[in-house]
Image (tube, helix red, strand yellow):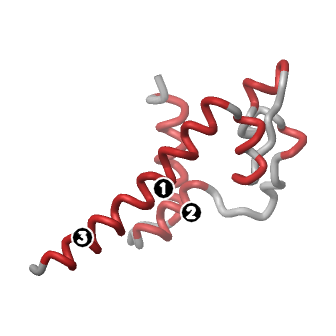
Amino acid sequence: MTVWIKRLLAVIVVLPGLLFVIMGLRWLIAPAGIAPSLGMTIDTGFGLSSQVGMWKPDEWQAIEGLPSYAHAVKTHADMPEPLEHYEAMMKYNDEERLY
């Protein structure tokens, strides 16, 4: 490999790394300044523990009409047994093997 190709590859690898380091430092020093550029908001008080929105049920999407977990697994893995088999297996795991 020629020298200029090695340098080009080094630049291609180093530039994104520098951008990540700069964003990380900005996040540590002044999160309120970088958050909007990442499409985020900074919550305060009790909102700090729910930064992702995971603990805000009123903001969750509706789940009506979505397939069951067993259906999603069966479809994704292209499993041959009938759906009822997987539904029963998931129910057993939830009730008997969870902890």
Picture coordinates of residue 19, whole percent (x, y): 51, 54
Q: Name the residue under label 3.
A: 7
Rendered location of residue 52, percent (x, y): 71, 39
Characterize the local packing of mark 2: few (<14), some (14-19) or many (20 or more) Cα atoms within 10 angstroms. some
Front residue of 52 and 68: 52
Give the number of the disc on residue 68.
none
- Locate residue 93 relative to residue 68 in the image: left or right: left
Q: Mark 2 points at which residue?
A: 71
Of callouts 1 and 2, the N-terminal one: 2
How far apart marks 2 and 3 lie (CA) works out to: 50 Å
In this view, 63 is above or below 79: above
Q: Which amino acid does label 3 sit on?
A: Arg
Q: Which residue is drawn at 70% across and 35% down?
A: 31
Q: Where is residue 85 in the image (x, y as percent from the top left)?
A: 47, 57
Secondary structure category for the residue under label 2: helix
Q: Which amino acid does label 2 sit on?
A: His
Residue at (9% x, 79% y) in the render? 1
| Element carrying mark 1 | helix
Local SS, label 3: helix
Q: Which residue is drawn at 29% across and 74% down?
A: 8
**Label 3 CA crowd tier, 10 Å (few <14, some 14–19, many 20+):** few
The answer to whether mark 1 and mark 2 are in CB contact below 8 A is: yes
For marks 3 and 1 on the same chain, the one whose residue lies earlier in the sequence: 3
Mark 1 sits on what residue? Answer: 86
User: Mark 1 and mark 2: span between their CA atoms?
Assistant: 8 Å
20 up-or-down from 99: above or below? below
Q: Is residue 71 above or below residue 40?
A: below
The answer to whether 96 appears left or right of 80 in the picture is right
> Percent position (x, y) of residue 29?
64, 30
- Depth-wise, is mark 3 or mark 1 nearer the camera? 3
